[in-house]
Image (spheres, helix red, strand yellow):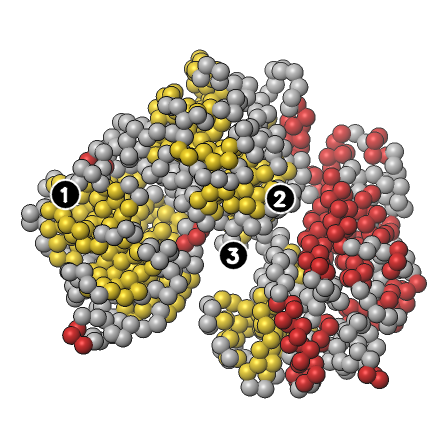
Amino acid sequence: MPLEPGQSLSHYRVAEKIGEGGMGAVYRAEDTRLGRDVAIKVLPDEVARDPDRVARFQREARSLAALNHPNIAAIYGLEEAGEARFLVLELVSGETLEERIARGPLPREEALGIARQIAEAFKEAHTAGILHRDLKPSNVKITADLKVKVLDFGLAKPFLPDAPGGSSGLTRSPTLTMGATAVGVLLGTAAYMSPEQARGHPVDRRADIWAFGCVLYEMLAGAPPFIGSTISDTLASVLKEEPDWSRLPGDLAPAARRLLRRTLAKDPAARLHDISDARIEIDEALVEPAESAEVGAVPRGAAARRPALGRLLPWALAGLASLVAIWIALQGVGRAPAPAARLTASILPPPEVSFDTSRGLALSPDGKRLAFPAKDGSGRVRLWIRSLDRPAARPLDGTDGAAAPFWSPDGRRIGFFADGKLRKIEVETGLLESIADAPAAYGGAWSETGDIVFSPGFDRPLERVPASGGTPQPVTQKEKTSDAHLWPSFLPDGRHFLFLNRVYGSEAELGQLRVGSLDGSPSRLLFSSNSSAQYAPPGYLIWWHGGNLRAQRFDADRQELQGEPFVLVSGARFDPRAAVAVFSVSRTGILVYQEGGSLAGNELVWLDRSGREIGTVGDPGSLYSPKLSPDGTRVALDRSDETNRGDIWLIDVNRGSGTRLSSFPEDDSVPVWSPDGAEVAFFSAKGGGHTVVYVRSTRDGSDARLLIADPAADLEPADWPRTDLMLLNRSKDDDVDIFLCSIPDRKIRPFLATPFREWDAQVSPDGRHVAYTSDETGSMEVYVGTFPEPGERWRVSADGGRMPKWHPGGVELYYVTLDSRLMAVSLKGRNRGGDRPAPIGAPEMLFRVDLKEHRLRQFDTHDGTRFLANRNVSLGAGVPLTLVVHWTEP
């Protein structure tokens, strides 16, 4: 049955038709219950009306739904709506392998990389006892980040009708012996059918291995290995002929040729028995030199007689001539010192992928591999690995949201931060383990001793934990609670490490680059700096200052600087909020960095209730905590400089022009408007040991006045609902509570002070209720309670939430879920006594945001029809990385 856009099947709303084949039409649809896009494949009437085949589909769908692998497109289930029966499938973006091959043969490394991922998918399915039975290029999707997704896994089995005489046809191909008008005819399948399938014999996993060999051959040769003008001719070729091996690239590694011969052996007994062996051959082919005596290949001795430039030609043909400089540079690593000119080369992000250098990067200790977070077209961020002697990079599965990567000393593993955890991953096997809790990602370093030193957040000292896991222990001592210990980096002895002590206070008081020790002894000051630093052989420190990377001689044994610093490279990127420059240096002295200015870029954008962007406010910059004025004409925010010292600015919403409200030399942030818009309160580090709250008029030139200070805790304004009353977040140690401040007498008292953390208090427009965030359930949730006295309260969020905001009319409450959805909750009417908003409607998703990737930092609204969002600007996403060798002289 054909479907039209907007039509619904059960809770699936059809968006558009995206394909059609023998197994039915395929549509893009929205799963309105889960808020995600899916593909639905509507079964033809001939199948949907056959109870036996429907029963088989139901049984098989349950088995297939159990497959959970990144290279297999998921099958969510078989459902029905009215007379329609349809499969619900993972929606995979990108082009099919068939479309890719149509543009010509694939470069051998790209083809082998795709084949390896197909093999990974087959290994998962074969282990579960599931065969594909219909692998071909049109059933393989390649996403924008070069991730392979195998489609229609196992669907051929239940799709087939029973064979005549009651013998099941489940072992056969969908095209075998079926009439041209039969349901499920897939004319392209014959070219990938194994000889035993073509003869009508039962099949096992070796039939899938044959099809795998056909697909790999076609990627390399640009055409299938068996071709005929008719299906009969094609099947005859499958049964009797050998592939034309001369069509394969002349530089194909022997391991790849060996793999093709073993997968395309006509006798199943002589064919590769297990797809896991294919992965071994592919890995060998990726590192094996290209030399072969096959027909059409370069003779075995010819490669040895080529000049050096000839051996580099495949890189140039792949559009990566810049790697020649890298290759030459790598040959010199480890040789006797000799004067040499500086060499540089550019490293581009993978196709359809952008660098996310705000999350760091890391060269392996031997300088041969680069780990970097990158974002694909869907916004998904993962770690990628690039061997510098190869043109292709690959993502590491299981590293979604990764930040601040760092290598183990042996280069086999990478530590990183994601989802509030310090984690590690085996580069070759993909084995992933969590090591410790780490709410923030401000750097880690891995010692030869097997210990990791890492920063768990701005408010805690550096901690030491065994790489195998355990209980972290403090390894540095903070002199002031407002200091932040960040970005550790080990010195050559493996016992001492550099780190940045980020100081918050006077603009003149920069941070401190210090040397700490694994034994926890007091650290030693090297010099003042606002940047992370790394040790670089043969004996230098590298750090960022004034827009440039600087270097200076450093005696690591004595921990002393020598000589004068010099500018290593000009215009290196720096993140002032995180106090880290975008660079990494290996133990072999190779440097990689990214050019550009500040990474801390944000912009204010208007989004409508569907999430569509409808405008911007002001210029991008390092912006934080925007708050709309009561009349909606201005926005107050913190705009920071490269030292992360913020000032409060007022931006005109219509004109985009701004005026500075605060100009203390200390950090100012988190503005809150008075009810009449005449004043703005904000926190300031001017209090010295703890932040305090100041207030300044928005209408005259009077100086800011101190409102309240607490010598034992940090204070920041949360809401200013009445001229005489302000709500504050009070932070002490690791606890956060909500306090009330009486403005006339400048005294504070607890409002919500429990063993749990409560913050983000927002009073309803009528002043009778307060919404806030609490972690008392172990997860952040949004609550509504009575105000101004605490009393009865109700949880509003259903599955996690934060950042509550009221509609000015009090009819809705908005918040963001932990899985990145902006929700609206209807609050209409009052219950008995008028104390409780009633009824509290079920949360409704307005649109999906991306808090995990920090696209949305904060939001505000003035009327509920549009939302002012503070989102990150993607700076440096398309800027190449620069690799430098022989940089040690000014």
State the residue at coordinates (62%, 65%): 66
Whichever of callouts 3 and 1 sits on the residue coming sooner in the sequence is: 3
Residue 569 in the image: x percent, y percent? Answer: 48, 27
Name the residue tied to disc 1.
708
Number of the front mark, 2 or 1: 1
The answer to whether mark 2 and mark 1 are in CB contact below 8 A is no
Amino acid type for the residue under numbered disc 2: Ala
Q: Would you call the spot at circle 1 few (<14 residues within 10 Å), some (14-19), or many (20 or more)?
A: many
Whichever of callouts 2 and 1 sits on the residue coming sooner in the sequence is: 2
Q: Is residue 300 above or below residue 187?
A: above
Residue 745 in the image: x percent, y percent? Answer: 6, 47
Whichever of callouts 2 and 3 sits on the residue coming sooner in the sequence is: 3
Name the residue tied to disc 2.
393
Q: Secondary structure at mark 1?
A: strand
Q: Is residue 701 left or right of residue 460?
A: left
Name the residue tied to disc 3.
378
Amino acid type for the residue under numbered disc 3: Ser
Q: Would you call the spot at circle 3 few (<14 residues within 10 Å), some (14-19), or many (20 or more)?
A: few
State the residue at coordinates (61%, 60%): 68
Q: Nearer the viewer, residue 733 or 683?
A: 733
Q: Is residue 234 above or below residue 507?
A: below
